[in-house]
Image (cartoon, coloured by chain):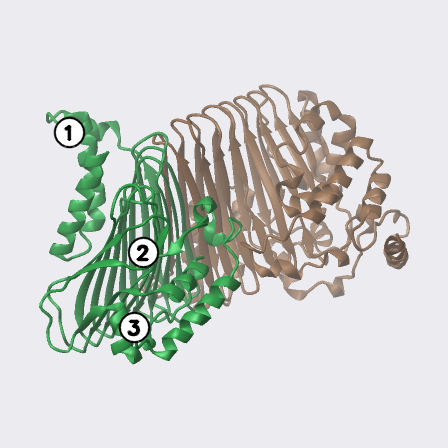
Amino acid sequence: MSAEATIDQETQAAIDVDRAKGDFHFPENHKYDAGVGLSTDTINYISDVKDDPDWVREFRLKAYDTFLSKPMPTNWATEDLNNIHFDEIRYYLADSQKPMRNWEDVPDEVLETFERLGVPEQERAFLAGVEAQYDSETAYSSVKEELEKDGVIFVNSTEGLKEHEEIFRPWFGKVIPTGDNKFSALNSAVFSGGSFIYIPKGLKVKHPLQAYFRINSENFGQFERTLIIADEGAEVMYMEGCTAPKFETATLHSAVVELVAMKGAKIQYVTVQNWSSNVFNLVTKRGLAHEDAEVRWIDCNIGSRLTMKYPGVVMKGERARGEVISIALANSGQHQDTGAKMIHAANNTSSNVVSKSISVGEGRATYRGQVHIPKHLKGCKNNTECDALMINANSKTDTYPAITVRGNQHVTQHEASVSQVSQEMLFYMQQRGISEAAAMSLAVNGFINDLVSEFPMEYSVELKRLIELEMEGSVG
Amino acid sequence: MTTTTPVWFEESQQRALAEYDALAMPSRKDETWRFGNMKQLNFEGYTPEVSSDLSYNIPELPEGVICMPFEEAVEQHGELVQQYFMRREARLGSAKFTAFHKANVKSGLFVYVPDNVKVEQPIEVSHVISGAKQIAFPHTLIVTGKNAEVSVLDRFASANEVDAGLCIAVNDLIAGDGSKLSYCAIQELNLQSRMIQVNATEVGRDAHASAFTLNTGAQWARNEAISLMTGEGAHSDMLACSIPSGTQQYDQRTYQHHAAPHTNSDLLYKNTLYGTSRTVFSGLILVDEGAHYTDAYQTCRNLMMEDTAESNSMPGLEINADQVKCSHGSTSASISDEEIFYLRARGIAPHQARRLIANGFSIEAVERIGNDRIEELVVEAIDRKFASI
């Protein structure tokens, strides 16, 4: 009991300090901050502030116990995870409470990247954390109106669980149970922000939905929780993140994203992750595909210190399809530990994984995958390809797939290759008057070109530019 | 008989026994035992065998070659054995069992081929495991000098079909610079028995080592194979062919360690699965920092002959160097209807067609051994297995 009391004091102290900070920049809005460290008090505080229904509060508290009981997965994952200090992390800050900084505090390289990518002035301020809000309501309102007319629900998760409990609750925490891993348990305990989307039967949403539209909500939260449900025959594409670097002081991001594709539905989820290189990005993403449904994850990881993300698809209905397309770029000081999880749970299901990684400087890229085809299923297919490109002599790359097949009526194949940009290729281009750096950049873009084209137009253009930027200075 | 076992050997056995007692039993949580069947590690009531039954078929040997039972070599060539005997740690999960082996080893084979000497015919050793609940600890230690050549075949069989035995075998293959070392193990234990085989290969500059394992017997077999390439131009072939049926289980872990630049390794594991059999393959290619211009390949193919079989594959890569060519592939599939149709159209019965294809699938790995006499013996063992299914 006394231990809790001390935490209380510390928490209080932390709140006070930050209020003063917040006051300075945003005097009008600074109500909520759960302080530093995690305890049942922190969770109750979050529940109080968010005015959670009782079932959510219970869910959070139970998840907290699970979080405490789960060990760090360092038996297979990198030891770097031990550098996360859970008691030094701030688990909840209302949007406007985010510590603000001046333009002078924003690192030069971030500013330069904005310049080079052509990020609009107003967005820059938000992305750099100089401004907490970026008002995209005007751009978004016409799209929003149209969606509402069709019966689409597109709100943040807090609103979702309160206003649409009858749709939200049956699927919430069902695709990814709390105890799935230590970080999904952590997210379940302290989640805030993220989106809840429901697409009614038969509706094919023309425009991709973007978290970006609601950038001024809690979308870029540390512990966001997203649930997307596409009803029978519906189709939707959702995009999160953006190519511009997001400058962050928070060091742990742990999101949970659950997708539910009902019979014949199709969900595509596009992520471009470019956190700054001090961030641990530990994300659990999984989709559930019913009969004839399709779930596609298109995932691009460029930023962060350590990313551990293995989007999964559980193919529960016959003829369901799952796909993961993944690009990872690991620069010096970064470890991109990404992959895919394909769980076949019905006959004639098929899955496809294509992963391309690039290691630059001392960067390390890892592919970790799981394909599971249980007993008594027929006609399941899996194709896995992972290619790694290594730019410098001290770059690192690893591949650890695990494939379980039971029965003789399935086809699986896994292939991986590791290669370099050959001297001949560079020489060929240099001979034609292209500088070595430009040649290298061209070769790298060529390596991932077929995957980049899977991204929506504006993303693919920015992605290419970003990769050119990252490649700079890697040769010569 | 007077024993003149050297002091260093007795001491190393005592240390190994202490190590065995100190080490924890592996658990499923260990990455090296993922998908493993821990129930098979219950050796309660098993005791080290009192005497071992080995027969040697040794061809005419050129001068200078040492080839004798392991226990005699310990007495007569103590310094040589000491220099090479189990000097690498077991990194693939069986450290406890290799310590157990070290503490109890008393039979096996020692071969030393001096520089520039070639042994043309293979040296053959036949191990017959007998007695119920007895553990055999055979050790094969092969050392080749510069530009030397030798090939060795170990055959493991049970004395009868009823006694449940356990065989914990360890091989050290040390291929000196420019030498050629070929090793083959044929495992045909009875269906009551279990086998742990740990293989450690070291390949020197411009040397070529090849290790092949055939698994057709035993209720459960665990194979661990490490190949360490220490000198430029080293080449290592790691081959295996397994045909489990009924409830047999094979658990195979491999490690291709490239510690020097311009080295080359090629792994091919082929599994043909019948009945409710189960295989685990976990392989890792590790390219050390500075081991540039490495070529490393790793392929595991599973042919699923029946609906009830299960294969697990974990092909892995860890690359820390530049200018590397590495690839790994793993496939699991069954015989397609087209293939069967092709053979049926030529008047071959479906049952026979399936066997022909399975046979051809296995032979692909056997052909890479590159020694006619050994290949012949392996093919015979494969035929025996197919005939029993």
Q: Is residue A94 left or right of residue A149?
A: right
Please, what is the three-letter code of the amino acid marked with disc 3?
Glu
Q: Which residue is mark 3?
A: B232
Specify few, some or many for label 2: CA neighbours under 10 Å numbering under 14, 14-19, or 20 or more: many
Q: Is residue A433 visible?
A: no
Q: Chain of mark 3?
A: B
Mark 3–mark 1 distance (CA, rounded to whole Å): 46 Å
The residue under label 2 is B297
From what the image shows, is residue B89 above or below residue A267?
Answer: below
Of the chain colours in the picture, the one used for chain B is: green
Q: Hey, what amino acid is under mark 1?
A: Leu
Q: Residues within 10 Å of mark 1 (few under 14, many from 20)?
A: some
Q: Which color has been applied to chain A in this rendered view?
A: brown
Q: Position of residue A348 (x, y in %)?
A: 41, 26
Residue highlighted by disc 1:
B343
* Mark 3: secondary structure: loop
What SS does tag 1 mark? helix
Contact, CB < 8 Å: mark 2 with mark 1? no
The chain identifier of the residue carrying mark 2 reads: B
Q: Are marks 2 and 1 on the same chain?
A: yes
Inspect this view and state whether residue B173 appears: yes
Mark closest to the chain's N terminus, 2 or 3: 3
